[in-house]
Image (spheres, rainbow, N blue to C red):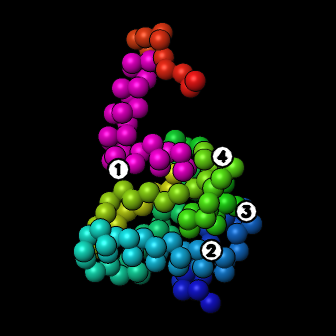
Amino acid sequence: MARGAKDYPVPDFLIEAGIQQETYGRWLDRITNAHVGRDRDRLGAEIKPAIYRKAIHEAVQRCKGKDAYTGQPLDFRLLEFIAGAPVLGRDETLVPTLDHVVLNPLHPRFEFCSLRTNKCKADLTAEELLDFARAIVTYSGETKDTPTNH
């Protein structure tokens, strides 16, 4: 049995999406290991998987199935895409991804958001993302000549 399955019960909204405990546990272990490995390389620090696993599980519970930045619903039936599977042909507003909010090996904080939100946010803090979005909205209200996709 996956460590995540043993220690972290699957949240109700995931059960409603058809995610079983063993699937959640395997996913939680995979995503934890991926982020621990990446952050060890980025930070050059020792990271305990148990700390990250707990922080990721807390992010899942907090999100309640919604993008932390937009409030839009995420499709957690697409859980396998969170672990890095290709998302070709998927609506990026529905695919849940894990966003680092605090990059600290002892006290990490993660949030869930859509793939589209995560791509837009990139390395911005939540406040920087809001400032950027406000600038776009303000400018779009000042000009009738808005860029189009051609």
Q: Could you tell me residue 105's position as x and y percent? A: 30, 72
Instruction: Let me know if residue 128 is in the magenta part.
Output: yes
Mark 3 residue crowding within 10 angstroms, few (<14) / some (14–19) / many (20+) = few
Q: Residue at 28% across / 81% down in the picture?
A: 46
- Label 3 amino acid? Glu
Q: Is residue 120 above or below residue 86?
A: above
Q: Where in the figure is residue 59, as x and y percent of width and height?
A: 48, 62
In front of the other: label 3 or label 1? 1
Are the residues tagged 1 and 2 within 8 Å (C-beta)?
no
Disc 4: which residue? 91
Q: Mark 4 is on which residue type?
A: Asp
Q: Which residue is mark 3?
A: 16
Looking at the picture, does residue 47 appear above or below residue 139?
below
Q: Nearer the N terminus, badge 3 or badge 4?
A: 3
Amino acid type at image mark 1:
Asp
Q: For marks 2 and 3, give the CA distance.
A: 13 Å
Tell me the distance, in whole angstroms, between the alpha carbons under discs 2 and 4.
Answer: 22 Å
Q: Give the mark nearer the N terminus: 2 vs 3.
A: 3
Q: Nearer the viewer, mark 3 or mark 4?
A: 4
